[in-house]
């Protein structure tokens, strides 16, 4: 532990500039699929949305048949337009969409 009067070293401007230029380009996600035994590891671009995760490339209306949740205990599904990088989690649960009652 530094003494109370000690001066802390600040990073050089070159280090700060390099850190600002680095951007997240890929995400490694763990997706547990309904009725599976273990998660699937998926690598997607950082700009991908929730809709891209069930079926990358938007294969027709097939993506509309699935919902993405934070866990299998979460009742609310994630909105399809949300960016995966902004959700604050890398672990998800993919299940088929329940018919409306």
Image (cartoon, rainbow, N blue to C red):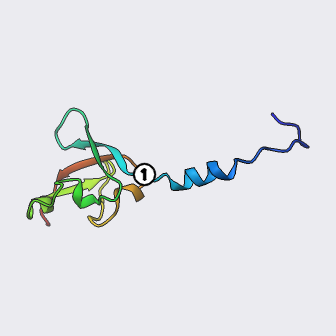
**Image quarter of the C terminus:** bottom left
- Name which residue lies at 70% across and 47% down: 11
Tell whether 80 sits left or right of 6.
left
Residue 76 % position (x, y): 30, 60
The local secondary structure at tag 1 comes to loop
Q: 37 or 98: which is nearer to us?
A: 37
Check the image and report above or below for 89 versus 2. below
Residue marked by disc 1:
24
State which quadrant residue 78 falls in. bottom left
- Taking the spot 45% from the left edge, 53% from the top edge, the residue there is 23
Residue ID at (23%, 57%): 52
Asked if residue 92 can be seen in this view, the reply is yes
Residue in the image at 32% along x and 44% along y: 29
User: Closest to the observer: 54 or 43?
Assistant: 43
Q: Position of residue 48 (x, y in %)?
A: 30, 58
Task: Please tell me how crowded label 1 is: few (under 14), some (14-19), or many (20+) other residues with Cα within 10 Å.
Answer: few
Whether residue 77 appears in this view of the structure is no
The quadrant in which residue 60 appears is bottom left
Picture layout, residue 94 above or below residue 80: above
Image position of 53 (left or right of 13) = left
């Amino acid at each position: 532990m530094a003494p109370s009067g000690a001066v802390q070293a600040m990073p050089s401007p070159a280090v700060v500039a390099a850190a600002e230029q680095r951007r997240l380009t890929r995400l490694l996600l763990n997706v547990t699929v309904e009725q599976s035994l273990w998660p699937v590891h998926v690598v997607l671009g950082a700009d991908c949305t929730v809709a891209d995760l069930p079926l990358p490339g938007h294969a027709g209306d097939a993506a509309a048949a699935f919902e993405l949740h934070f866990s299998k205990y979460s009742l609310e599904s994630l909105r399809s337009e949300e960016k995966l990088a902004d959700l604050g989690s890398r672990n998800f649960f993919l299940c088929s969409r329940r018919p409306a009652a």
